[in-house]
Image (cartoon, helix red, strand yellow):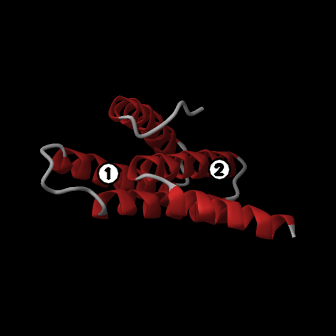
Amino acid sequence: MMQAQMNKYVNNSVQTASPAQLLIMLYDGAIRFSKAAIDALGKGNNEDANRNLCKVQDIIAEFIITLNTNSSLSSDLIMLYEYFKQRLTEANMKKDKGPVVEVLGYLVELRETWIAASRLAGDVKRSS
């Protein structure tokens, strides 16, 4: 019953979120899954690491396909996101958490940048 209520809450949150809030939610997920992958790699749990790395890559793919290609920043962001995917693939193949730690750092910085930009635009309230 608790899981059903949680799913309902998450579904409602996604349906009522602004585009900026959705982007930040995706960054939150990518950060959470990156941390889980780092933890799994540290414990030698390759199955969990693979699953979480794939989730991060899926989110990054979503970033790429939803970019406004008319924006002057889009080509730079695409190159950055492709780099992230390459590093995560490398981490998964070599079972090395170093590339994930690197990508995680960038994801955290980008999340903070999007939050600041969204606040300036008046789209997002203070977030943790």
Judge the density around disc 1: few (<14), some (14-19), many (≥20) Cα neighbours within 10 Å.
many
> In which quadrant is the N terminus drawn?
bottom right
At horizontal 70% and vertical 58% (from top left) the residue drawn is 45
Alpha-carbon span between mark 2 and mark 1? 20 Å
At horizontal 38% and vertical 32% (from top left) the residue drawn is 113
Place residue 102 in its image quadrant: top left
Q: Is residue 55 above or below residue 91?
A: below
Is residue 22 or residue 111 the one in the foreground?
A: 22
Q: How many marks?
A: 2
Residue designated by label 1: 81
Q: Position of residue 103 (x, y in %)?
A: 44, 42
Q: Amino acid at mark 1?
A: Tyr
Element on which disc 2 rests: helix
Residue designated by label 2: 36
Q: Amino acid at mark 2?
A: Ala
Disc marking residue 23? none
Q: Position of residue 34 (x, y in %)?
A: 56, 48
Q: Position of residue 60 (x, y in %)?
A: 40, 57
Is residue 67 or residue 88 the one in the foreground?
A: 67
Element on which disc 1 rests: helix
Q: Position of residue 27 (x, y in %)?
A: 48, 47
At horizontal 72% and vertical 49% (from top left) the residue drawn is 43
